[in-house]
Image: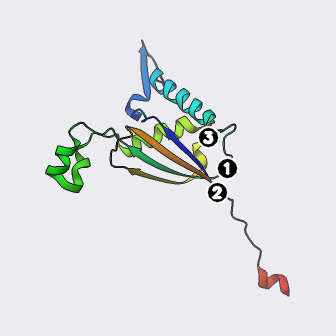
Amino acid sequence: MITLTLPYPISANRYWRTAVRGTFVSTYVSKEAQDFKEQVGWLCKAAGIRAPLVGRVAIEVQLYPNRPQDFKTRMRKLGAAWDDTVQCLDIDNANKVLLDSLKGIAIEDDKWVRRLSSERMEPDEHGARVVVRIEQLAVPVVQGDLLGAVA
């Protein structure tokens, strides 16, 4: 299993840019998204990843938003639900950016993701980040008809 602590991802809303020149429209990956992917690549390399996992994978994502300075006040007022008031990316937006950033670096392609679990975590003293765990999954082996083979 690979465990990576990565910077807080950019929103999928800022991932793509569209340029219109006359009647020609082109969509491209933003500079901010390219920078994020490059940073993920360096962190993967530092973690010892030399080649992407090939084939089926399961990915677990833990998204930690930034803890606001007034978190203690929020805790007193709102109790256990205080972190519902903290600004955080939508999980689906974070997943898209993360999977695209890991593609070709830690995983072969996001088409091989067979299980994806994501959780928004309570902000803590370690700052905004995302923890990603990647597990390579074995391909199940189909057995023949065992009773038919006896006859």
State the image coordinates of residue 23 (x, y, percent, origin top left): 43, 15
Per the image, label 1 sits on a secondary structure element best described as: loop
* Residue at x 58% of width, y 29% of height: 42
Q: Position of residue 17 (x, y in %)?
A: 43, 23
Determine the residue positioned at 51% across, 25% down: 34
Give, as a three-letter code, the residue at label 1: Gly
Crowding around mark 3 (Cα neighbors within 10 Å: few <14, some 14 to 19, many 20+) is: many
The quarter of the image holding the C terminus is bottom right
Query: Which residue is identified by label 1?
Result: 55
Residue 11 as seen in the image, left or right of residue 142 = left
Q: Are marks 2 and 1 in contact (CB under 8 Å)?
A: yes
Q: Nearer the viewer, residue 103 or 142?
A: 103
x and y percent of residue 109 in the render?
61, 42
- Sequence-wise first label, 2 or 1: 1
For marks 3 and 2 on the same chain, the one whose residue lies earlier in the sequence:
3
Q: Secondary structure at mark 3?
A: loop
Residue 104 occupies quadrant? top right
Residues at marks 3 and 2 touching, judged by CB atoms closer than 8 Å: no
Q: Quadrant of residue 69?
A: top left
- Which residue occupies the foreground of this view, 114 or 83? 83
Question: As displayed, is residue 17 above or below residue 109?
Answer: above
Q: Cα distance, mark 3 to mark 2? A: 14 Å
Separation of marks 3 and 1 at Cα, in angstroms: 11 Å
Q: How far separated are the C-alphas under marks 2 and 1?
A: 8 Å
What secondary structure is found at the residue carrying circle 2? Answer: loop
Residue at 43% x, 35% y: name it.
9
Q: Which residue is mark 2?
A: 137
Which residue bears the numbered disc 3? 106
Query: Which label sits in the foreground, 3 or 1?
Result: 3
